[in-house]
Image (cartoon, rainbow, N blue to C red):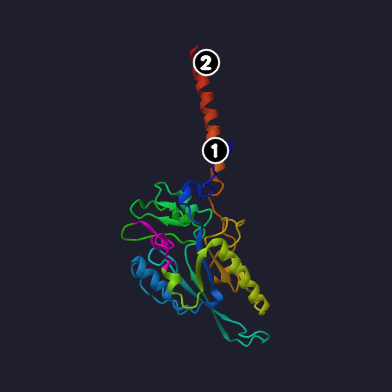
């Protein structure tokens, strides 16, 4: 007899049976991002995400600052003084690193695993979605996310984030952000195919002399089991404000809770035995 799934991730896609679809996701190639923010606008328009202030940080041209309940797509602007051409010395010229960030739709999704109401669920496409009509605003998922993606709206306390345009996927359409991207920096498709495409792109950049190109969150053996939204970066993850080695903080709680319950059962059995023995 096989052991039951340890987490909801291991139960997917079997839990959907014949209705399960190939796992879908995003591959974001930051090497061709031009920082136009068309993805941010398309996301807001399609999902009716409220305006988020548009306050300039003073650090760069960025006016949306980061991901949050009212910013499901965020284009980061990173300024660097670095050689702009291969083989040149450090002449102090400015380079822009731009990257459209989004919920990672983790394989091991801590947010989903700690949700007490089932408001967070994994869809038939392998994506992670919040059901706003079920969310009770407890906020447990907010600190559980290793990327700081989840956020509560101040007016009602519920959590909101990217759904990978679940409604569009059900209608066989690509997400709004990917459709709006003019350079194909945001690529949408079956996750296995995207990973193959991403590795080929890294090899192309390496052959062209861009040695710094690397993939981020594409490895199924990393601390979150790989992500449904992964990236090609041109520098270390920290430069983009991303954690270098993210880990699902509750990944091992399944075995831990089973051990705790077994120990508690043994204690209760001992107490019951002592009580019955005292009556004899």
Q: Position of residue 261 (x, y in %)?
A: 52, 35
Residue nearest the viewer, comparing 186 with 224 = 186
Question: What residue is shown at x 39% (from left), y 47% (from top)?
Answer: 117
User: Magenta region's main secondary structure?
Assistant: loop
Q: Position of residue 182 (x, y in %)?
A: 46, 78
Secondary structure beneath disc 2? helix
Q: Could you tell whether 162 is left or right of 203 in the image?
A: left
In this rendering, is residue 280 above or below 265? Answer: above
State left or right for residue 94 relative to residue 207: left
x and y percentages locating residue 173 in the rendered image: 42, 65
Q: What element carries label 1?
A: helix
Q: Which residue is the extreme one toward the left?
A: 155
Residue 172 magenta-drawn? yes
Mark closer to the chain start, 1 or 2: 1
Q: Residue at x 55, y 33 (%)?
A: 262
Res. 142 image quadrant: bottom left
Q: Mark 2 points at which residue?
A: 277
Q: Identify residue for label 1.
A: 258
Quarter-wise, where is residue 48 in the image? bottom left
Residue 16 inside the magenta-drawn segment: no
Query: CA gap, disc 1 to disc 2?
Result: 28 Å
Q: Residues within 10 Å of mark 1 (few under 14, many from 20)?
A: few
Dividing the image into 4 quarters, which one contains the N terminus? Answer: top right
**Disc number lying in front (1 or 2):** 1
Q: Give the range drawn in magenta.
A: 157-175
């Amino acid at each position: 007899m096989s052991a039951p799934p340890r987490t909801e991730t291991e139960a997917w896609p079997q839990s959907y049976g014949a209705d399960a679809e190939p796992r879908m996701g995003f591959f974001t190639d930051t090497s061709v991002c031009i920082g136009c923010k068309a993805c941010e606008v398309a996301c807001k328009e399609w999902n009716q995400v409220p305006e988020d202030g548009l306050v300039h940080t003073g650090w760069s041209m960025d006016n949306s600052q980061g991901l949050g309940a009212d910013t499901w797509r965020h284009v980061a602007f990173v300024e660097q003084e670095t050689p702009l051409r291969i083989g040149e010395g450090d002449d102090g010229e400015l380079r822009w690193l731009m990257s459209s960030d989004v919920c990672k739709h983790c394989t091991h999704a801590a947010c989903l695993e700690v949700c007490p109401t089932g408001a967070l669920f994994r869809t038939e496409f392998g994506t992670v979605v919040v059901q706003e009509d079920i969310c009770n605003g407890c906020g447990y998922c907010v600190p559980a996310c290793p990327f700081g993606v989840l956020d509560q709206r101040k007016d009602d306390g519920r959590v909101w984030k990217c759904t990978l345009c679940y409604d569009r996927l059900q209608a066989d359409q690509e997400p709004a952000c990917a459709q709006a991207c003019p350079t194909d920096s945001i690529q949408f498709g079956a996750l296995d195919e995207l990973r193959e495409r991403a590795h080929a792109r890294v090899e192309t950049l390496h052959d062209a002399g861009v040695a710094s190109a690397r993939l981020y969150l594409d490895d199924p053996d990393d601390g979150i089991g790989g992500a449904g939204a992964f990236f090609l970066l041109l520098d270390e993850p920290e430069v983009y404000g991303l954690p270098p080695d993210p880990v699902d903080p509750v990944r091992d709680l399944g075995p831990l809770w089973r051990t705790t319950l077994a120990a508690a059962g043994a204690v209760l059995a001992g107490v019951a035995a002592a009580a019955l023995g005292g009556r004899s």
